[in-house]
Image (cartoon, rainbow, N blue to C red):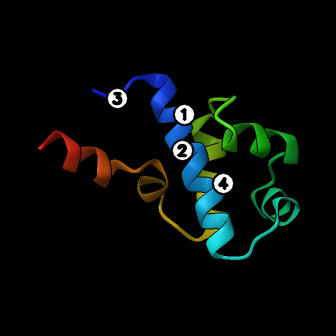
Amino acid sequence: MVNRNERTLMLGGKIKRFRDEKNISLDELANNANVDKNTISRIEKGLGSPSLDTIVNISHALKVSPEELLGYGELREKKD
């Protein structure tokens, strides 16, 4: 089972990876997601656990599903 700290680090890494892949700056993501830039930076570094609303806003701004952002497919694959 994945613990909370590992999930937080995985989420932050996924946000950063999607942002880099899509060439979206931290400022642009913050603006499009209506989330403070410092909040996103902390999440990317694994220093904060975002609310569900924040996860949904970020996923929409990155044009990925919340499930993809959270890595549910990957977690299921590891479990099986």
Q: Amino acid at mark 1?
A: Thr
User: In the displayed structure, would residue 30 be above or below residue 48?
Assistant: below
Residue located beneath label 4 in the image: 57
User: Mark 4 and mark 2: span between their CA atoms?
Assistant: 14 Å
User: Mark 2 and mark 1: span between their CA atoms?
Assistant: 5 Å
Do tag 4 and tag 1 residues touch (Cβ < 8 Å)? no
Residue located beneath label 3 in the image: 2
Q: Position of residue 39 (x, y in %)?
A: 79, 39
Q: Amino acid at mark 2?
A: Leu
Do tag 4 and tag 2 residues touch (Cβ < 8 Å)? no
* Number of other residues with Cα within 10 Å of mark 3, as a class: few under 14, some 14 to 19, many 20 or more: few
Q: Amino acid at mark 4?
A: Asn
Task: Check disc 1 and report its element: helix, strand or loop.
Answer: helix
Do tag 2 and tag 1 residues touch (Cβ < 8 Å)? yes
Residue that sits furthest to the left in the current view: 80
Residue located beneath label 1 in the image: 8
Residue located beneath label 2 in the image: 11
User: Mark 3 and mark 2: span between their CA atoms?
Assistant: 12 Å
User: Mark 3 and mark 4: span between their CA atoms?
Assistant: 24 Å
Residue at point 50%, 42% (across, down): 10
User: Mark 1 and mark 3: span between their CA atoms?
Assistant: 10 Å
Task: Check disc 2 and report its element: helix, strand or loop.
Answer: helix
Q: Quadrant of the N terminus?
A: top left
Residue that sits furthest to the bottom in the current view: 22
Task: Check disc 3 and report its element: helix, strand or loop.
Answer: loop
**Lower position in the chain sequence, tag 3 or tag 4:** 3
Q: Amino acid at mark 3?
A: Val
Q: In screen coordinates, is 10 left or right of 59?
A: left
User: In the displayed structure, would residue 14 be above or below residue 21?
Assistant: above
Q: Position of residue 27 (x, y in %)?
A: 88, 60
Q: Which mark is residue 37?
A: none
